[in-house]
Structures are given as C-alpha cells and as structure tokens.
Image (cartoon, grey):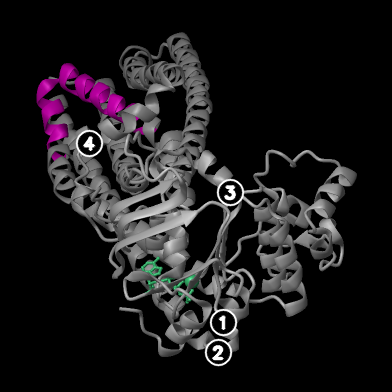
C-alpha cells in the first residue's frame, strides 16, 4: 500500500472558486432548497400576488385621475380608493406569508448545514485537526452558516420578488407607451453593465472579510488555549499585538466588504432619478403633443419607481447573494473533504499468531518529516513491551499508528492477523485502549469519564460499580479524588492536576479490558506511591492483555518482556534492559 499523506489544509486565501455566476450559485443552492420545495412554492405564490397587487396600483391611480378626478366624479374616486385599499391589504397579507414561510426555511437550512458540518468534522481524521485552526472551523460553523440563513430568510424572496416586479413594471412601461417606456429603461441598461463588471470584485471582498473573521477567531482561540503560558511568560503584549493585527485586518476587510456591498446603492439611486427625469420631460412633451394624458403620466412615474426601487433593492440583495456564496464556498471547502482513512475490505493476511504487526511500515506527517522508514515489528499476545527513545524520536507516532490514529504512508499494520484498516472504528476501540500523552477529559464527573464509551459497565448502579472497581483494584485510585467518583471535572479540565487526569484516563482504559493497552507516558506525572498502585492494577489485567508502555522513567519499563528503541526513523530491539539504558545514554541506535 502506498498512500501519500493527504493534505487537509483548508484554503484561507482567495481561490479560483470566487466567480459568482448565477449558474454556479444555483448548483450550490438547489440541493439545499430541494427539501423546502413546498414552503418555497407557497412563498413564491404569495409573492406573485403581492407583486401583482403592487403593479396594479399605478393603473388604478392613473384611471382614477383621467376618468374620475378630471371629471369631478366623487363616487368613482371613492370606489378607486376602496379598490386600492383592498389591494394594499392583499399585499400586506401575502407579504406576511412570505416572511413567515421563508424565515422557517432559512432556520432549517442553517440547522441542517451546521449538523452536516459537525458530522463531517467527526468523520475527518486527526490530520485534519492538526492542520486547521479550531477558531476558523468554529467561524465556518457559526458565521458562514448564518450568512446563508440570512440569505434564505430575507434575501431570496426579495431577490425573486424584485426580479418579478422589475419585469412586470418593465412590461407595463413599454406596453402603455413604447417610446416613453424605452426612454425610461435606458439608465437601467447602464447600471446592469456596471453591476456585471464589479460583482466579481464584490464577492472577492466579501470572501476576504469572512476569511479574516475566521482567522481572528482562530487567533482568539489560540490565545485562550494558551492563556496560562501567556501569563506565565508575560507575553500578554505579544498576543495583544497579534490580536490587534488580526483585528485590524478584519476591520479593513470588513470596511472594504461593506463599501463593496453598498457601492451599488448610490449608482442605482442615480439611475432611478435619471429615469424619472427622462419620463417627466419626455412625458410632458408628449402631453403637449396630445399623445399622452396626465393620468397616464402619473401612472408612468409610479411605474418608473416600481421599476427602479426593486432594481436598487436587487443591488443590495445581490451583495447578500455574493456574501452567501462566499460563505457557501467556505462551508463546501469542509464538506467536500473526504476521510482518507476509510474502513476497507482487505484480504491481505498478516501473522495470525501476533496481536499486532507492522509490516514494512513507513510514516511521515503531511508537510512534515519522515518519522518511520520500513519498520517491521511484532507484538505477541500477553506480553509487555516498552518503547524508549529520545524526545521527538517517534514513540507517540508509533503508538498512534498502532491505534490507527494515522495510516502508514507505506506498508501495513495488522491487528490479530487482519489489516487494521478493515476494522470499524468501534471494533478497533474495543480491542485497543490508548492512554494519550495529553489525556482528554469531558466535563462531568470522574464517574462519567471513566465509563465513557464503556458498553459493559455504563449502566451499573453505584454499588455494582464499586464492586467492579474493587475487583480491578481501582478503588484506591478513586480515593485519590476528593469526592471519589462524584468529583466534578470542569469543562476545560483545569480543576485537576495532570496526574489526576492521567489517573482518570488510566481507569477509563483499564475498565474497557482491551486486548492491547497502550500507555503513552501515562505515569510521567504521577507520584511513586500512586504509580505502584497503577502497576498493581496492570498486573491484575487478564494475562492475555498485551501492553505497550512508553516511558522516560526507566523503572517503569524494567518489567517489560521486550524493549524497543525508537529513533532515527527506525525501531530497534534493545535486547536487555541494560542495553536499552546504554542506548538511551548514548542517544544512538544499535546498528
Ligand atoms: N502532528 C504532527 N505533525 C507533524 N509532525 C509531527 C506531528 N507530531 C509529531 N511530529 C514530529 O514527529 C516526530 C516524532 O514525534 P513523536 O511525538 O512521535 O515523538 P516522541 O518520541 O513521542 O517524543 P516525546 O518523548 O517528546 O513524547 C517529531 O519530530 C515531531 O516533531
Ligand atoms: Mg511522545
């Protein structure tokens, strides 16, 4: 097997994808809208009614002027006013229906996209999280999806409604008097050309603004994560400067995006005024010539407004569409990634007598250096192995490959004679218990944490659990916590010492009774008395349990059946304990 380490770095610069064509927008948005067909259809029909109502009013007013007002027909005026009132009511009701329907659509799309993104994040391999900043991901899940929500709940209907109004008003304008109509439409042609020319630029500015928002939240997250270190090293000013830079960048980017989004407004206003001016001047000329009535001219001016107002709104909505598309791009950057560590069918068989086997395994981190090269390794059932070696030698990496946190770039790892890639994540977790160098605890209690993911014991009552713990000799370890099993674990795990966290992780792994137990520096932060307790517990594990222990402290590995020295891209059998010590002292590997 040969697989290049996949790069999971999300683009944080503008990419080719920013061409905001309608066709592309449609392709991205259509699947989201498919599930909401019914609601969108109802909203569309409501919108049609409200547009027709709005479009009818100028005719009604024009007629009222020509037929009733100029002839002093008061009853006719009253009836016209009543008809107008009814059309306004219709517009009110249909407008409300639109808002109500589309608001729901926006929320549901937001909800669905956030779910999809989060599910995708859970599918992605660890490499993805190594290569991307959490803050930027959070920004994609929160801000970008919300931009789409805004588009759907507000902009989409305005977009369609305005387009419809423009078309309707345009038709009325030309149909009532084609010369006057065409004259009124000339300025519109100019703004359309301008819009076409600058909309790519608008979208670019918007994307840049979203990206800078993403990197700012990444910056915030990083300094929050490292706050203790920052204070301890008195580097507040350093992070303040970095944050200020990110904030400044975001400020400039969002000012630019704001200008870009609103630049259409004055242009469209100007076109609207120009249109009205043309209609008035030309219309009065036509009246003088006897080709037009006053009522018709009033109706005309209203249609010009009905044409240009939606056009101006369309410009704003167009920016909102550009923003939504930029957001959608950033969301799809994530959604389009696929896990390069799928469960595969593999007929290849390793040595079935071995619990775990490395066959010609090479590994390097994506964008990193090579850590292992053509390594072969056999772990027998029930034996204890120690991995030793200098810092950065590759011990944690080797252990990660054993638990398939990564796939080798070359070669195969076999678990119980089968390609480790053919196990589902769940089955793999049943066989392998891994105590990480940096244990991770969830907020809750110690009890929640040690029973996490443990199907066998998760529903045990207090007494029954006590018994299990006694049996596994874990009860003394529980005694290391002030409130025993009920001890609270804070959301960030900061209320516990590192050693206590390692104890919890240790109990969690042991209670699952894995066939392979990997301890990465699991005892590095634990006092010697507690460490003896840990060893007692380990000794009580079934004799079939295979243990891989990574430790800098040599006394912890004395009892190992075999010691491996990990350094310089290779793993070497150290033979005896004394030889291992010698190798460590000299920091070199056996030839
Ligand atoms: N996520 C990563 N991306 C890129 N390189 C990495 C990553 N993790 C580790 N490395 C590199 O791989 C090498 C091996 O690291 P590893 O963590 O396996 O060492 P180790 O033997 O466990 O060290 P220690 O004793 O300090 O825990 C190091 O040079 C390290 O810089
Ligand atoms: Mg390590």
Sort mark 1 into few (<14), some (14-19) or many (20+) by Cα contacts within 10 Å: few
| Residue 147 belongs to the span the image colors magenta | no
For residue 574, what is the image quadrant?
A: bottom left
Q: Earlier in the sequence, mark 1 or mark 4?
A: 4
In the displayed structure, would residue 402 be above or below residue 577? above
Q: Earlier in the sequence, mark 4 or mark 2?
A: 4
- Whole-number angstrom distance, CA of label 2 to CA of label 1: 6 Å
The residues colored magenta run 158-187
Q: Is residue 311 left or right of residue 40?
A: left
Q: Of tags 1 and 4, which is closer to the observer?
A: 1
Q: Is residue 58 left or right of residue 105?
A: left
Q: Which residue is mark 1?
A: 229
What label does residue 24 carry, if any? Answer: 4
Sort mark 4 into few (<14), some (14-19) or many (20+) by Cα contacts within 10 Å: few
- Whole-number angstrom distance, CA of label 1 to CA of label 4: 46 Å
Asked if the residues shown at circle 2 and circle 1 are in contact, with their CB atoms under 8 angstroms apart, the answer is yes
Q: Is residue 243 left or right of residue 470?
A: left
Q: Residue at x 37, y 61 (%)?
A: 131
Task: Estimate the x, y position of residue 211 in percent, counting from the top left.
Answer: 35, 59
Q: Which residue is mark 3?
A: 515
Q: Earlier in the sequence, mark 1 or mark 3?
A: 1
Q: Earlier in the sequence, mark 3 or mark 2?
A: 2
Q: Secondary structure at mark 3?
A: loop
């Amino acid at each position: 097997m040969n697989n290049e380490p996949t790069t999971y770095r999300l683009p944080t610069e503008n990419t080719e994808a920013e061409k905001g064509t309608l066709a592309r927008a449609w392709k991205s948005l259509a699947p989201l809208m498919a599930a909401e067909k019914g609601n969108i259809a109802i909203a569309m029909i409501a919108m049609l009614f409200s547009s027709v109502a709005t479009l009818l009013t100028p005719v009604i007013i024009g007629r009222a002027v020509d037929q009733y007002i100029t002839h002093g027909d008061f009853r006719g005026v009253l009836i016209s006013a009543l008809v107008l009132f009814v059309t306004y009511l219709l517009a009110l009701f249909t407008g409300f229906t639109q808002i109500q329907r589309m608001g729901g659509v926006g929320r549901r799309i937001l909800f669905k996209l956030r779910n999809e993104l989060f599910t995708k994040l859970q599918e992605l391999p660890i490499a993805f999280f190594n290569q991307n900043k959490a803050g930027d991901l959070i920004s994609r899940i929160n801000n970008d999806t919300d931009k789409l929500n805004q588009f759907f709940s507000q902009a989409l209907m305005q977009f369609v409604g305005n387009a419809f109004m423009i078309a309707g008003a345009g038709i009325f304008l030309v149909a009532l008097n084609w010369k006057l109509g065409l004259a009124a439409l000339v300025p519109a042609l100019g703004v359309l050309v301008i819009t076409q020319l600058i909309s790519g630029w608008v979208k670019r500015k918007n994307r840049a603004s979203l990206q800078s928002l993403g990197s700012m939240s990444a910056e915030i997250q990083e300094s929050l994560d490292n706050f203790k270190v920052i204070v301890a090293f008195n580097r507040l000013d350093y992070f303040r400067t970095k944050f200020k830079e990110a904030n400044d960048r975001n400020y400039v980017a969002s000012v630019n995006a704001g200008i870009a989004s609103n630049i259409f407004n004055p242009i469209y206003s100007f076109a609207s005024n120009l249109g009205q001016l043309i209609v008035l001047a030309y219309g009065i000329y036509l009246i003088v010539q006897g080709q037009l009535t006053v009522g018709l001219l009033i109706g005309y001016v209203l249609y010009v407004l009905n044409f240009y107002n939606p056009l101006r709104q369309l410009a704003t909505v167009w920016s909102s569409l550009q923003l939504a598309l930029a957001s959608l791009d950033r969301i799809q950057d994530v959604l389009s990634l696929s896990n390069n560590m799928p469960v595969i069918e593999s007929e290849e068989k390793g040595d079935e007598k071995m619990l775990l086997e490395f066959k010609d395994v090479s590994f390097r981190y994506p964008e990193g250096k090579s850590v292992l090269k053509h390594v072969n390794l056999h772990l027998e059932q029930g034996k204890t192995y120690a991995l030793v070696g200098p810092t950065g030698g590759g011990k944690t990496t080797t252990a990660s490959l054993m638990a398939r946190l990564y796939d080798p770039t070359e070669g195969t790892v076999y678990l119980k004679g089968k390609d480790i890639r053919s196990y589902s994540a769940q089955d793999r977790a049943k066989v392998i218990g891994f105590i990480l160098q940096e244990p991770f605890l969830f907020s809750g209690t110690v009890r929640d944490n040690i029973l996490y993911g443990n199907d066998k014991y998760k529903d045990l009552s207090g007494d029954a659990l006590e018994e299990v713990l006694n049996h596994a000799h874990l009860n003394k370890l529980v005694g290391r916590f002030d409130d025993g099993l009920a001890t609270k674990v804070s959301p960030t795990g900061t209320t516990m010492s590192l050693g206590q966290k390692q104890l919890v992780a240790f109990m969690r792994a042991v209670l699952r009774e894995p066939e392979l137990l990997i301890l990465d520096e699991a005892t590095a932060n634990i006092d010697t008395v507690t460490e003896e307790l840990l060893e007692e517990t380990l000794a009580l594990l079934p004799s079939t349990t295979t243990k891989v222990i990574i430790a800098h402290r040599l006394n912890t590995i004395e009892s190992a059946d075999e010691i491996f020295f990990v350094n310089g891209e290779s793993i070497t059998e150290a033979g005896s304990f004394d030889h291992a010590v010698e190798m460590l002292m000299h920091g070199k590997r056996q030839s």
